[in-house]
Image (spheres, rainbow, N blue to C red):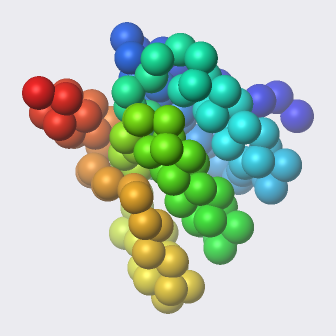
Amino acid sequence: MAPVPVLALGDVLLVSLQGELHDGMAEQLQQDLSERIATAGVTGVVIDISGVEIVDSFLGRVLAEIASTARLLAARTVLAGMRPAVAITLVELGLTLPGLTTALDVDRALELLSQRGR
């Protein structure tokens, strides 16, 4: 099981989730992001979920925990590319994803992070 690739774009980390993300991979991603934020002076994290068909309650919780951890380490998290069906599922599950800002796509997510930095 290969780790989820994380790209550094200056002081922003870009994570692109594709297909199904198994629980172990999600937990490993959370740990890897926390370490990279703490050691690399990261100010923002963009998580692109446009390639994800289903966000279950576990993945929703992991995404919220990534945002909480990033916030404690002085970085902001933006969730990009959420499909309408995924949004409906999250609402039906009662998941609010506190601490996560959302954007329609990665470009808008990066724009949001650059605006808040001013």
Counting from the top left corner in percent of width and height, residue 11 is at 39, 17
Q: Quadrant of the N terminus?
A: top right
Counting from the top left corner in percent of width and height, residue 18 is at 61, 42
- Residue 51 visible in the shown view: no
Counting from the top left corner in percent of width and height, residue 64 is at 53, 59
Judged left or right of residue 91, residue 18 is: right
Residue 30 quadrant: top right
Q: Nearer the viewer, residue 113 or 88?
A: 113
Q: In which quarter of the image is the C terminus?
A: top left
Q: How many marks?
A: 0
Identify which residue is drawn at 28% across, 50% down: 103
Q: Nearer the viewer, residue 106 or 42?
A: 42
Q: Nearer the viewer, residue 29 or 2?
A: 29
Q: Is residue 7 above or below residue 113?
A: above
Q: In this view, does 61 lie above or below 73?
A: below
Residue 116 quadrant: top left
Q: Is residue 88 above or below residue 27?
A: below
Identify which residue is drawn at 56% across, 46% down: 69
Identify which residue is drawn at 37% across, 45% down: 78
Q: Which of 89 and 39 is in front in this view?
A: 39
Identify which residue is drawn at 70% across, 30% down: 32
- Residue 73 visible in the shown view: yes
Counting from the top left corner in percent of width and height, residue 92 is at 50, 88
